[in-house]
Each structure stands twice: as structure tokens, then as C-alpha cells.
Image (cartoon, grey):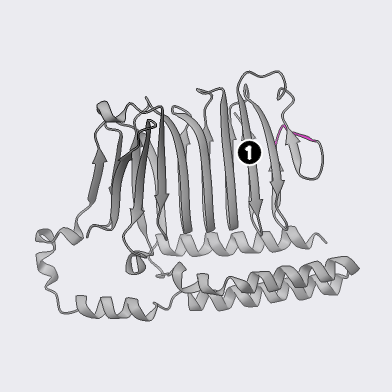
Amino acid sequence: MKVDRIMWGIVLLFIGGVLLLENFNVIDFYWSSVWRFWPIFLIIAGVNILFNKSKSQLGGVVSISILVITLVLLFFKGQEPRKNRAIVFKEFEHRDFDDQDEDSSFREQHLSLPYGTDSTAKRTVLNISGGGTSFELKGHTDSLISAVSDRGGNTFILKNNFSKDSVATLNLKMRGKGEWNSGGNSMDIRLNRKPDWDIHVNMGAGEIDFDLSDFKVRQFSFDGGAAALDVKLGSLLPIADVNVKTGIADVKINIPSASGCQIRAKTGLSAKEFTGFIKLDDNTYETPNYKTSKNKIFINFDGGLSNFEVKRY
């Protein structure tokens, strides 16, 4: 019995089920309420490692049972707003919601930065952070960057810093901890296709859906907890680095078949599916054209209980 794969499948079903129930407005799930229980997964991993050494079928059943009980507990805990959120909602009870159209907190939030003379940097760095948010790349723009959030109230901040070494740094982040907005946020992003991009995403829980095949991406990094990540890369630059560090996540990376690719994976109990790759050792995989290709993509995976998938298109 492959306990690792069964446990990972259960976790994926849990995350997918919660996200689906949220999308249909069946439940309100607050990821920030359950994230403080993350040490439980260290305990589960420890129990699983101990029983795996003896290859005991009873041990596998015990590990799976502990995981299921834990997820049931988290399911109910995740539907309880944290105390500081309750104070915020209490204040809103006394507002006149008939005037929503006149209140900016109920409108979409639009953010953008122009593409001008100060934007012609050798490198443009985009830092994205925000919990409980779904970020999707919707295409390109004539601006340097534009973003639209479905939540108003100035939930997000967008700042631009241009340094003397021709590096433009853009920071797109949620104000404060974003506690009362931690569930159901959605943000559509558009980027200019002219700069070389370094994109760094840091988030606790959420979703990333980025089709970067038409953009010059030098580096993409992701550091997150319970998240879903779907990224498609192109071959407009000779070298691209991808670094993904996760706790519990579903990670899908699509790369051009013409590009050579090397994967280094420190994945613990995670599931791996690297279609079209040659396994060199337990942690290293390469495409057959890795040494001969002019375009190369280097991928580093570091995850606990995650699903990592790389496909060529």
C-alpha cells in the first residue's frame, strides 16, 4: 500500500472540496483560522516515517486515520472567523448598505503603473503577496502593470521603486494582514511584454494561474502554504529559473518541449509526475534535449506534502 500517495490524494480532495464549496457559497472558509495548526502535519509526517520503516499495513491505516481526523477538525475550525474579524463585521452591521454604490469599499479596486522612461530597466522585479487570494494573469497591457481586484476598500497596494542599477521593483501586496478579506479575493493581472521579468510570489493560502508564455521571464519563485499553482513558461529568454517552496500545494508547471529542462526536487512525502523527463537520481531529472538545447529552464522544488507536476507542450 503506497501510503504517501493515498495521504496526498486525501489532502488534495480536502483542499479541492473546500475551494469548490467556497466557490458555490456553501461555506465561508477562513484559511487564516486553520494555518496556525500547521504543526499537526509535522506530527503526521513523523508518524508516517516511523511506520514506513517497519512497512506495517496497520501503521499505514493509523497514519491515514490520523490525517482524516485532522482534516475533519480543520474543516470545522476553518469556518470559524478569528476574533479580530468578528469585531470588524460588528462595525459593519450598523452601516446602511443601501448606499453601497457610493462607498468605494464595495467597488472593484483598479491599480496600474505607466510604462515610461523610468520603466526601461534592464530587469523588472514583481513581488506579489496576499493571503486567501486567487491571482490570475489575464494577458498583456500597454502599462507596466495593471491589476483589478474584485474586493474594494483599498485592499491591495501597488508601489514602484526604481534603483540606480536599472532595476525596477514592483510590490503588489495586501494591506496589513488582510484578515477580514482573507477568503474569496480574486485579482486579475496584466503585464507589459517588453521588460525582462523576475516574479516572486509569497502567500499563505490561495491560487496562482499564470500563463507567462508570451513574457520574458528570467525568474519565477513561489513560497506558499496551502496553495494551487498553475504556471506556463515560454522560451523568449535563453535561461529561466523556477523555484517553488510549498507546504501543502498542487503545483503544475508547463514548459516548451523545445527547451531543455533540469529539475531538482526535495519533495519529502510529495507526489511527483515529470512527463518526458529522464531520472538521473532520486532528486534530479532532465529532458532528453537538456544538453543540446539553446534555451534552458532550471526548476527547484522543495515541498512537504504536495503534488508536483511538470509537463512539456
Residue at (58% x, 76% y) in the render: 72
| Majority SS type along the magenta span | loop
Whether the magenta-drawn stretch holds residue 239 is answered as no
Residue at (53% x, 32% y) in the render: 233
Tag 1 residue: 299
Vertical order, 289 against 205 (above or below): above
Which quadrant, please, contains the N terminus? bottom right
Residue type for callout 1: Ile
Which quarter of the figure has residue 240? top right
Which quarter of the figure has residue 196? top left
Q: Magenta region: which residues?
A: 275-279
Question: Which of the two residues, 165 or 109, is positioned nearer the viewer here?
Answer: 165
Percent across and percent down for residue 212 are: 46, 33
Name of the residue lying farthest toward the right? 54
Which quarter of the figure has residue 105? bottom left
Q: Disc 1 on helix, strand or loop?
A: strand
Vertical order, 170 against 129 (above or below): above
Q: Is residue 99 left or right of residue 205?
A: left
Whether the magenta-drawn stretch holds residue 278 is answered as yes
Tell me, yes or no, if residue 23 can be seen here: yes
